[in-house]
Amino acid sequence: MKRNRPELRIRDLQVFFPHKPRPIRAVDGISFVLHQGETLGLVGESGCGKSTTARAVVGLAPVTSGEVRLEHPEAFETHRGKPSLSFRRRVQMVFQDPYASLDPRNTVGQILAEPLEIHRLAKGKNKLLRCTELMLQVGLDPRFLNRYPHEFSGGQRQRIGIARALALEPEFLLLDEPISALDVSIQAQILNLLQELQGELGLAFLFIAHDLSVVRHLCDRVAVMYLGKIVEMAPKHELFERPGHPYTQALLSAVPIPDPLLEEARKRQVLQGEPPSPERIPKGCAFAERCPKVSERCRIETPVLEERDSSHWLACFEV
Amino acid sequence: MAFLEVSDLRVSFPTEDGLVEAVRGVSYELGVGETLGVVGESGSGKSVTHLAMMGLLPETARVAAGRLAFEGEELLEMDEARRRAMRGKEIAMIFQDPMTSLNPFSTLGTQIAEMLRMHQGLRGKALVDGAVRALAEVGIPKPEIRIEQYPHEFSGGMRQRAMIAMMLAGHPKLLIADEPTTALDVTVQAQILELLRGLQEARGMSIILITHDLGVVAGQAHRVAVMYAGRIVEEAETRTLFARPSHPYTRGLLSSIPRLDRDEEQLVPIPGTPPDLLHLSGGCPFRPRCSFAEPACGESEPALREIGPGHRIACHVDLPALLKVEEAK
């Protein structure tokens, strides 16, 4: 049998949350593949389902239907909401808020050792050695292992969050807005750290963000979500230079650029309205009511994501 | 006489660990119809400076200034009644979270009517008409229905519009906007920024836009002041600031952010972390993070000095000259 490189396949994933009178369709049937060593950006506005997608992949949100499949040289495994211990070892998550995601009552040493204990990967002296190594890997002084999270700055805490995710030597890291809560001057430090770690360890990243400038800098491919669905997915340059979906175009045109001359010359396409609530997803294309290119068909049928050019996927009737 | 004149403004707070000086001598002027962008990270003093201007700081705060004058009138010497009358009528402030300004228990119409009664002396039916007009002006659809609704019935963007409508009901001459779009999605941010630009043109208002986002400033402000550790470290016309950033901190910020319109090989982060205001060591507070620091930087804190027309920096190093030499090499 052919030996595959590790990859994470998400197929027809739906995550609905119970709600009256209709369930909330947070993630409404999305599929994508995360390949070994690459960075896939998952972007969209609040409520589009990007974080819920990642949480469902690691078993922190219920999977309503669809599956998550981890392919590996030796084996593959599939889960529909309850990933196995070995899946969780290989797929780890880093959260947005470094203040909320670290237990304030534990020292950094305890925080880093916990996954090693749960997965029975190291004991005694080896455990301490591994924790020391992790601290060095994320640029922190190992002497701080017996300090508590509140003794660190926001940037340092995010380094601890990254170290914890790396403890189990995962192949896939799901990063949920890992720099959004940090000061501007600190964000670049963390972005550079992530790039270094990826180079060293061959990690694959699913990078969830609302900041498209950061996504352009970090990602190889980008998927744009709107109301629970992927509306466009393409290699980075393709997406930023030739955005196809009217929503992607509007999103890109709304991002401010730190250059006054450019800002003055730019033609802005300001979208009207706000995304509808995932409680009440309209019939047809969910973007139709804000779309400048809307046609009759868009209000009746739902466009599916299909490959137009090589690796450029689009869900739109009018492009 | 400047429209707004701030000179050597200082704000400190007593804490358990001692007195924290959050604003350490801020000076600037603002003209009529001008937008000043105030940029800085958390703890830089950008919000505290302007809360002090509004008289909205807690009573424990100690505020002092060489001069803090709005249209020639000294703000710190006013009695509380005059100050309250000014808030909303002459100077208004909007915040990142509209719920800090909106009352959750009262309809939007009632809240706007309150402002119209207080600041424009309207009564009766004129209040309802005024509230409807105010919501229409900020682009809220179906204003005659919306005035009957409570803040929780509005989406994030609409709530921000409603707050702007309420704050503008007194026709202030100066609007202080503190991170007005930070909590909003980028497409909604674009709408609110466009709205602010339009309102400014229509009313000839002055705006102080406080933000951490250099992109927002680039498209919105005429002039920019960059703050660090409670002081302005660089101030210039927007174009000048982005074309020739001359304080190492400003340069550092600009080279540490990725851009939508081009590929960056590698970001150059500013090393270290923002300073702890309780333990400033004397000398330039940016020195521990600065790659251009000289011995003089440890000895005294640099004052703002003019390096070009309207372009000021607080730095001992002659960065523009230094960079020219490097370019020549």
Image (spheres, coloured by chain):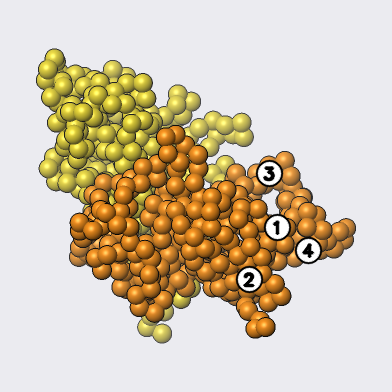
Which percent across, then down, holds residue B32?
A: 17, 43
Pointers 3 and 2 in contact (C-beta within 8 Å):
no
Pointers 3 and 4 in contact (C-beta within 8 Å):
no
Helix, strand or loop under label 1: loop
Q: Looking at the picture, does residue A73 appear above or below residue B83?
A: below
**Amino acid beneath label 3:** Asp
The residue sitting at 30% across, 64% down in the picture is A316
Which percent across, then down, holds residue B16?
A: 61, 31
Q: Chain of mark 4?
A: A
Which percent across, then down, holds residue B205?
A: 18, 40
Helix, strand or loop under label 4: helix
Q: Looking at the picture, does residue B162 appear above or below residue B230?
A: above
Residue A130's label in the rendered image is: 4
Q: CA distance from mark 4 to mark 1?
A: 23 Å
Q: Earlier in the sequence, mark 4 or mark 1?
A: 1
Q: Earlier in the sequence, mark 3 or mark 4?
A: 3
Foreground mark, 4 or 1? 1
Q: Evaluate whether label 2 is on the same chain as label 1.
A: yes
Q: CA distance from mark 4 to mark 2?
A: 27 Å
- Chain rendered yellow: B
Q: Quadrant of the C terminus of chain A?
A: bottom left
Q: Looking at the picture, does residue B326 appear above or below residue B192?
A: below
**Amino acid beneath label 2:** Glu
- Residue B242 in view, yes or no: no
The residue sitting at 71% across, 75% down in the picture is A74
Q: Residues within 10 Å of mark 3 (few under 14, many from 20)?
A: some
Q: Quadrant of the N terminus of chain A?
A: bottom right
